[in-house]
């Protein structure tokens, strides 16, 4: 007898963890972006995608931690209230 | 053909016959010779397997967990402190239903540090969902290894098996051993076919978090499997082994001179050897005595044990472990089994059950010691055998 504990891959995508956030969310200004990818690499949720001047977060999963804002070397991301 | 082999070497060669794809272990006395033998076999190119060196037992267990999750047969072995370091991962292996086969070369647990034999180490993992088998001699240790893979990997079971052998007595002792032909083992033991595996071309999630709405069923499933499928599978596999290899394998337990007995010893492991000698000597003196040797300790063959023992007058449980603050572990299982059957109304007779703790940390247990237990009329539940009063005092060794 087995319990159903093995799942198909990526079932976690159905769980929209961005449904509750810190109260703030990053805003990608997309002006001074150099395409260094630090925001993409640092995001603990892995929810940032894009390329130079098109980076943005997927707000279905963004928790509003602000790491991308802190890491951006050209201050091209800001935190704003929900 | 029989060969005169050290227990560890015989087990190493037997495991090689079972063709594991990944072997991973960390050396610890008295287990080391098993993996030394396997390392040699792999290095010589006689077995096509990955032998992975790691930095600890925790890593060794994690390594076989990962390996078997990808669908390859995996083997490890350890002892005592090593088993305790593996403990966390072993619960994971059982919970993930991964059929790893391991050997635990039973040894005392620190402190004080002691490398000699008793069975306290494996009792820590008693409740982990691992099938626990105990060998009496080197031949049986080898035979149980071959059967262990077949039991563990059966699609109705999918649980890890630990074959327990007594440290030094079976790991370093030499005996004439019959190692089977590769062809015969291949016939008995087909390639491991996993129900699910980690595969990049068909990704799956193993080991996901489950909440209160799911966890209970994972334990229910293991409990049901243990009590039904595992017991049945062990019986079937031992029968099949007996027929194919032409050598008796007993299954869940062995009955020795017990059918007409009034008193019976109950034990597991290598101490069954001297107990059988004691039984023989007592029989010569006209005493109606026998032995019930438990081979499969988890799942515990509760109903069978109660059925065999409930018609006796006296039961003497002899074991090399103790649940400090309670009694020996086997004593609890025997008493529980009898009481459950009694409550069901099966059997009016309640035998007197006495329990003895012996051989801890490698203390020798003689045939005379065992015979003496038969003659003492005392009713004890966890009496230590051959305690040296002169070793007790107020800490300071002078």
Image (cartoon, coloured by chain):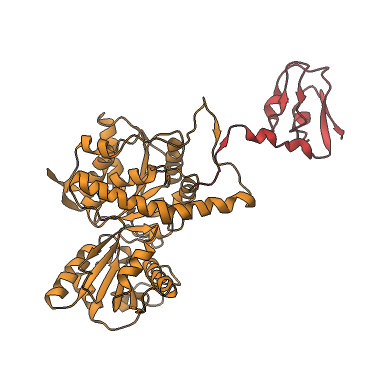
Chain colours: A red, B orange
Residue A65, compared with residue B217, is above or below; it is: above
Left of B226 or right of it: where is A18?
Answer: right
Q: Give the quarter of the figure containing the C terminus of chain A.
A: top right
Q: Could you say which quadrant of the image residue B367 lies in? A: bottom left
* A45 or B231: nearer the viewer: B231
Disc tally is 0
From this viewpoint, which residue is outermost toward the right? A81
> Looking at the image, can residue B263 be seen?
yes
Horizontal arrangement in the rendering, residue B205 relative to residue B94 (left or right):
right
Between residue B277 and residue B202, name the one nearer to us. B202
Q: Is any part of residue B24 visible from this angle?
A: no
Position above or below: B304 against A61: below
Q: Position of residue B267 (x, y in %)?
A: 30, 66
**Residue at screen point 37% across, 65% down:** B303
Q: Which residue is painted at 25% across and 47% down in the image?
A: B241
Residue B11 point in image, percent of width and height:
26, 45
Q: Position of residue B82 (x, y in %)?
A: 40, 50
Q: Position of residue B200 (x, y in %)?
A: 52, 26
Along the viewing direction, whichever of B287 and B376 lies nearer the viewer: B287
Q: Quadrant of residue A7?
A: top right
């Amino acid at each position: 007898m087995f319990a159903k504990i093995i799942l198909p891959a990526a079932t976690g995508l159905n769980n929209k963890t961005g449904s509750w956030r810190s109260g703030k969310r990053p805003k990608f200004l997309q002006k001074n972006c150099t395409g260094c990818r630090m925001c993409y690499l640092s995001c603990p949720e892995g929810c940032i995608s894009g390329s130079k001047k098109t980076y943005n977060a997927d707000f279905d999963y963004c928790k509003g931690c602000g790491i991308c804002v802190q890491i951006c070397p050209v201050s091209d991301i800001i935190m704003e209230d929900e | 053909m029989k060969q005169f082999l050290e227990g560890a070497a015989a087990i190493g060669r037997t495991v090689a016959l079972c063709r594991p794809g990944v072997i991973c272990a960390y050396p610890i006395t008295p287990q080391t010779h098993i993996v030394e033998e396997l390392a040699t076999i792999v290095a010589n190119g006689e077995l096509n397997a990955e032998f992975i060196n790691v930095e600890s037992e925790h890593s060794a267990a994690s390594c076989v967990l990962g390996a078997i999750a990808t669908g390859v047969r995996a083997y490890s072995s350890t002892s005592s402190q090593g088993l305790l370091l593996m403990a966390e991962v072993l619960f994971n292996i059982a919970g993930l239903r991964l059929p790893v086969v391991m050997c635990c070369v039973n040894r005392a647990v620190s402190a004080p540090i002691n490398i000699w034999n008793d069975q306290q180490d494996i009792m820590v993992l008693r409740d982990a969902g691992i099938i626990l088998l105990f060998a009496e001699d080197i031949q049986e240790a080898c035979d149980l290894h071959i059967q262990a893979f077949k039991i563990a990997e059966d699609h109705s079971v999918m649980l890890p098996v630990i074959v327990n052998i007594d440290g030094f007595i079976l790991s370093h002792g030499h005996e004439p051993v019959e190692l089977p032909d590769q062809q015969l083992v291949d016939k008995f033991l087909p390639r491991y076919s996993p129900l699910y595996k980690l595969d990049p071309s068909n990704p799956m999630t193993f080991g996901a978090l489950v909440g209160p709405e799911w966890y209970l069923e994972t334990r229910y499933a293991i409990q049901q499997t243990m009590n039904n499928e595992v017991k049945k599978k062990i019986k079937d596999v031992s029968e099949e082994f007996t027929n194919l290899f032409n050598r008796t394998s007993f299954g869940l337990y062995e009955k020795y001179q017990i059918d007409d007995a009034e008193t019976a010893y109950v034990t597991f492991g290598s101490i069954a050897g001297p107990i059988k000698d004691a039984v023989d000597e007592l029989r010569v003196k006209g005493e109606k005595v026998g032995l019930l040797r438990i081979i499969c300790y988890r799942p515990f063959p509760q109903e069978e044990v109660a059925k065999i023992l409930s018609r006796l007058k006296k039961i003497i449980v002899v074991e090399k472990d103790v649940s400090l603050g309670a009694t020996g572990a086997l004593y609890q299982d025997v008493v529980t089994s009898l009481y459950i059957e009694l409550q069901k109304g099966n059997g009016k007779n309640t035998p007197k059950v006495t329990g003895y703790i012996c051989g801890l940390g490698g203390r020798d247990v003689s045939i005379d010691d065992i015979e003496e237990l038969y003659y003492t009329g005392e009713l004890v539940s966890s009496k230590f055998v051959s305690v040296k009063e002169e070793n007790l005092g107020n800490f300071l060794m002078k």
